Amino acid sequence: MKKLLTALFSLVFVALGYSQSSTDTLSVKKAEIQFAQTEIHYGVIEQYSNGEKSIEFTNTGSAPLVLTNVVPSCGCTVVDWPKEPVSPSEKGKIIVKYNTGNTGTFRKSIRVFSNAKTSPVMLIISGEVKPTESNSSPNQK
């Protein structure tokens, strides 16, 4: 009985040791996305002004990064992103266009889906659109 238990424990320890060493030697290449900033504040901007911002990211992983989808939280925001893979250590840009025809404060989210370890990543844009003077005062004759 002692020999059987000793053999069983030895087998378990050998199997654990083998699985530990095989995971250490097998390094899986994976993409990783890192943004310079995940929250972009427009500040106070005038109605109908340029609502375009560029959000830069870097592939800090060891495999090509592929953005599969970039989804804004509403139709008032349009996004454009690289469709080609971004190589390790390379940078890319997501272009965000907020509709500044809408006045008032805003806070919108953008979800970035990719083949990175961390996916999706949530980006936030916020600010305030002030009406132009011609739109905020009544017509005077």
Image: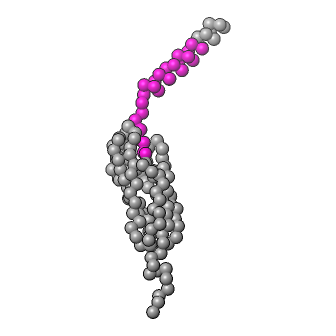
**Percent x, y for residue 115?**
43, 45
* Chief secondary structure of the magenta portion: helix
Can you see residue 103? yes
72 vs 108, nearest the viewer: 108
Q: How many marks?
A: 0
User: Farthest residue in the right direction?
Assistant: 1
Say which residue appears at 52% left-offset and 70% top-offset.
Answer: 104
**Percent x, y for residue 122?**
50, 52
Magenta segment: does it hold 31?
A: yes
Say which residue appears at 43% left-offset and 48% top-offset.
Answer: 35
Say which residue appears at 51% left-offset and 19% top-offset.
Answer: 17
Q: Is residue 127 above or below residue 60?
A: below
User: Farthest residue in the bottom direction?
Assistant: 141
Say which residue appears at 49% left-offset and 49% top-offset.
Answer: 120
57 vs 36, nearest the viewer: 36
Q: Is residue 47 above or below residue 113?
A: below
Q: Is residue 95 left or right of residue 130?
A: left
88 vs 64, nearest the viewer: 88
In the picture, which quadrant includes the N terminus? top right
**Percent x, y for residue 126?**
50, 61
1 vs 33, nearest the viewer: 33
**Percent x, y for residue 4?**
62, 10
In the picture, which quadrant includes the C terminus? bottom left
**Which quadrant of the view contains residue 7?**
top right
Can you see residue 76? no
Magenta segment: does it hold 92?
A: no
Q: How is the image coloured?
A: one colour
Segment colored magenta: 9-34
